[in-house]
């Protein structure tokens, strides 16, 4: 059974509203207003009334005293009144919306079998575009400008109440994000995250373990319940490196479908890199000529070079068109920590992890060109992973992790170096007690720092921006963009001065 979508009318143009207002104010044939108008016309010497443009468009101008049987029509024959045009537009929009829902427009989308149930909404808001960012301090986060121009994107009427969801089953985490489109972005309605360590032992056996799969299935069942309770209509569910690399990855995907009813797709490395860019694009500095974006995952790490020297003002999801090159490293925090150890990491162990990760960077085909672009300036790093958010939390000395302080924060090169050294000096027990790390990440955070250090040594940038967003947000942005939920208002039409002939 498929959930229906309430078809709301498309927003009408300013001219149409003016035409309806003029049509409502027009005197009715044979009424008292008509007699008053006729008497006034006789007093003025029977001067003929010339309908203005809005009256001609609506086809409901004043009654001509010389033609008492019909109202004047514009050239080209009678035109439908604005009200009829509005009803036709609303019917067409509702039909198109229902068609998209039935056909499942967009990759990896499914209609929910359960009707939506209103519940409390979250306060987090994501925007595909950001205001101008100035300065280099930690408070240079994105935000909505106070003034929104007339041609700013608005949410389409048929998408007002629709919910979207994105699920990312990675090597270490299972994450779900449910959101509702809003003007210039979307608002998070529900979120879920659980560390399942699906890729535990994958580097030794090349297979997913039974205990790991059970943990993942338990988390996926919770995600399914949230999707049904919320009545989500459009979603995309992807699995990444662990299911890509494991011999029994396809069998596990089928088991998920049978036991939970969720149809997961195994995303390619290229898709994963593109979605990371789409999710973090709003944090790209408007003045940057290039960005080194990296996503340090549990089983792989993606690095993307955005060459923005000729972007011509492009922003948001449109920046995915400027991916110059990308690479996916077969190293992540889980498999790197399993190979070298993650609890008690000596200086030699840390250097071994850095060299392990750096050896894979040599396969980046445009590495020298990227280094030359960095030397020219105006290139910054953009990191989306638990490693960089942990570094930012420790850097700000947060007693409890606060996404509002971390997402969009800037860190100078010296600050990143100091934080890595500080984490390396922490014993395992102190990392467990740190509120920004905890027991779940205490044995993985140094492996992430080693991967980050390898990237920094290969392509040294002076600034790093932290992103507590990524693949899930990229999925939501692409789904909503495919549905064209952000429509621009029609340009404001000013009526010409003087009499219209």
Image (tube, rainbow, N blue to C red):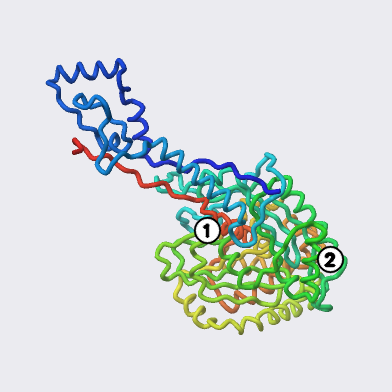
**Placement of 91 over or under 370, stated as above or below:** above
The residue lying at 83 percent from left, 73 percent from top is 201
Location of the C terminus (image quadrant): top left
Camera-side residue of 349 and 335: 335
Q: Which residue is mark 1?
A: 282
| Classed neighbour count for the residue bearing mark 1: other residues with Cα under 10 Å, few (<14), some (14–19), many (≥20) | many
Can you identify the residue that label 2 sits on? 212
Q: Is 294 displayed left or right of 210 in the figure? A: left
Q: Residue furthest toward the left?
A: 45
Please tell me which of labels 2 and 1 falls first in the chain.
2
Instruction: Measure the C-alpha gap from mark 2 to mark 1.
Output: 35 Å
Q: Is residue 166 left or right of residue 39?
A: right
Q: Quadrant of residue 33?
A: top left
User: Picture coordinates of residue 79 (x, y %)?
Assistant: 33, 40
Between 303 and 93, which is closer to the camera in this rendering? Answer: 93
Residue 210 in the figure: left or right of residue 152: right
Mark nearer the viewer, 2 or 1: 2
The answer to whether 247 is drawn above or below residue 136 in the figure is below
Q: Secondary structure at mark 1?
A: helix
Splitting the image into 4 quarters, where does residue 150 fall? top left
Q: Residue at x 15, y 18 (%)?
A: 42
| Label drawn at residue 237 | none
Look at the picture and state if 44 lies above or below 85: above
- What x and y, as percent, mark residue 344? 81, 71
Q: How many marks are shown on the rendered structure?
A: 2
Q: Secondary structure at mark 2?
A: helix
Q: Residue furthest front?
A: 69
Q: Nearer the viewer, residue 126 or 358?
A: 126
Measured as percent of width and height from the top left, residue 102 is found at 62, 53
Sort mark 2 into few (<14), some (14-19) or many (20+) by Cα contacts within 10 Å. some
């Amino acid at each position: 059974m498929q959930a229906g979508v309430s078809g709301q009318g498309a927003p009408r143009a300013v001219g149409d509203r003016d035409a309806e207002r003029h049509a409502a104010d027009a005197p009715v044939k044979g009424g008292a207003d008509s007699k008053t108008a006729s008497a006034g016309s006789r007093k003025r010497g029977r001067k003929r009334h010339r309908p203005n443009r809005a009256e001609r468009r609506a086809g409901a101008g004043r009654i001509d005293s010389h033609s008492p049987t019909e109202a004047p029509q514009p050239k080209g024959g009678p035109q439908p009144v604005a009200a009829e045009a509005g009803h036709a537009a609303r019917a067409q929009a509702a039909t198109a919306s229902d068609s998209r829902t039935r056909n499942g427009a967009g990759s990896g989308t499914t209609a929910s079998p359960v009707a939506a149930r209103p519940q409390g909404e979250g306060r987090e808001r994501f925007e595909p575009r950001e205001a101008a960012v100035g300065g280099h301090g930690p408070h240079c986060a994105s935000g909505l400008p106070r003034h929104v121009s007339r041609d700013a994107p608005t949410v389409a009427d048929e998408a007002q109440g629709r919910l979207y969801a994105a699920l990312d089953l990675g090597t270490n985490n299972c994450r779900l994000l449910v959101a509702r489109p809003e003007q210039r972005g979307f608002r998070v309605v529900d979120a879920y995250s659980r560390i399942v360590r699906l890729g535990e032992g994958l580097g030794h056996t090349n297979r997913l373990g039974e205990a790991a799969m059970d943990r993942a299935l338990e988390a996926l069942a919770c995600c399914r319940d949230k999707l049904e309770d919320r009545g989500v209509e459009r979603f995309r569910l992807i699995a990444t490196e662990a299911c890509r690399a494991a011999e029994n990855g396809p069998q596990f995907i089928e088991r998920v479908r049978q036991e939970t009813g969720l149809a997961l797709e195994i995303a390619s490395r290229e898709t994963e890199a593109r979605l990371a860019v789409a999710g973090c694009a709003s944090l790209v500095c408007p003045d940057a000529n290039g960005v080194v974006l990296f996503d340090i995952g549990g089983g792989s790490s993606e690095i993307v070079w955005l060459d923005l020297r000729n972007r011509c003002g492009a922003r948001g999801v449109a920046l995915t068109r400027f991916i110059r090159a990308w690479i996916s490293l077969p190293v992540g925090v889980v498999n790197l920590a399993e190979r070298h150890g993650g609890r008690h990491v000596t200086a030699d162990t840390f250097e071994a992890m850095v060299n392990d990760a750096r050896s894979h960077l040599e396969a980046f085909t445009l590495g020298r060109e990227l280094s030359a672009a960095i030397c020219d300036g105006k290139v910054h790093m953009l990191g989306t992973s638990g490693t960089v958010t942990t570094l930012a939390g420790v850097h700000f000395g947060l007693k409890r992790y606060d996404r509002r302080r971390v997402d969009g924060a800037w860190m100078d090169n010296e600050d990143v170096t100091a934080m890595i050294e500080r984490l390396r000096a922490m014993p395992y027990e102190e990392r467990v007690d740190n509120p920004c790390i905890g027991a779940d990440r205490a044995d993985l955070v140094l492996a992430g720092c080693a991967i980050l250090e390898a990237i920094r040594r290969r392509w040294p940038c002076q600034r790093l921006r932290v992103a507590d967003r990524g693949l899930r947000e990229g999925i939501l942005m692409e789904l909503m963009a495919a549905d064209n939920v952000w429509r621009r208002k029609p340009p404001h039409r000013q009526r010409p001065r003087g009499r219209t002939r």
